[in-house]
Amino acid sequence: MTRRATTLLILLATLLAACAPNTAPRLEIGSVPELTTFHPNQTGLERQYLYPNDALDAQTITHRVIGPMSERGTILTVEHAYGRGYDHHYYRSYTPDGVHLHREARPGVTITYEPPLQELPASLNTTPGTTWSGTTTVTINFDQGVTETHTLEYSNTIHEQRQVALPTGEHTVLVVDFQSRDDAGNRIVQQLWYQPYLGWVKLRDEAVLVKANTNGGGL
């Protein structure tokens, strides 16, 4: 495996995944207006996650919606994930076509997807068996001036609806199977949980929702 292929594999495997813990203080959940959108992206929305074997008072991974910005005529939502090694900013578009990831910035590196990577389908297409897929060019720009470019093919399938019990209560989630393959043949398989009107309930690295400042959500 080449260094370039290894770099892409690591970056994709850790998309919304944690590194080594840090000592940043935990932040208390604030309040936001009641959510009314199928794929919520309201400014101030905040969700906190822990790993399955964590104590409930362990430091959380926090995902916070910073707010909208305009870039070349496109409205992007800026989101920040931090804690437990995270310090990632995500730039997504939320449209009637679904949710697309345009760019992410981590310490020392910026990753751009062209065309944007589709993370979620439109709100009317979330029944079990729904699939969506695509091919994108991934450009990785390192602060040292090094740039790498890769081709990524990906697919998602809504496997089923499932009832799960978490510290936040009972949730009826969509189980999303994600697969990707890069131009070096490296393959990633992950499973996530998503609840409309609430957001991601289980992340790519198995962290699960333990607290959110939303009005709940549901199918």
Image (cartoon, rainbow, N blue to C red):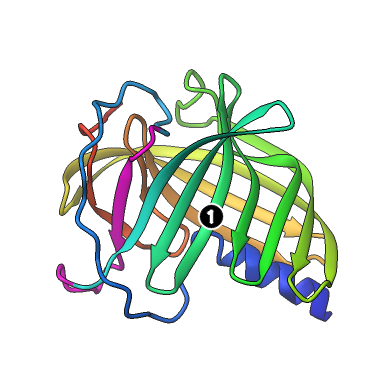
Amino acid type assigned to the residue bearing label 1 in the image: His
Of residues 151 and 18, the one nearer the viewer is 18
Q: Position of residue 49 (x, y in %)?
A: 30, 59
Q: Is residue 181 left or right of residue 31?
A: right
* Magenta stretch: includes residue 88: no
Of residues 217 and 162, the one nearer the viewer is 217
Of residues 193 and 102, the one nearer the viewer is 102
Residue 85 higher or lower than 206, as above or below: below
Look at mark 1 in the image and give the residue it sits on: 89
User: The magenta stretch spans which residues?
Assistant: 42-57
How busy is the neighbourhood of tag 1: few (under 14 within 10 Å), some, or many (20 plus)? many
Q: Is residue 16 left or right of residue 142?
A: left
* Quarter that holds the N terminus: bottom right
Q: Residue at x 38, y 36 (%)?
A: 43
Q: Position of residue 42 (x, y in %)?
A: 38, 32
Q: Name the dominant secondary structure of the magenta segment.
A: loop
Q: Residue at x 37, y 80 (%)?
A: 22
Residue 185 higher or lower than 126, as above or below: below
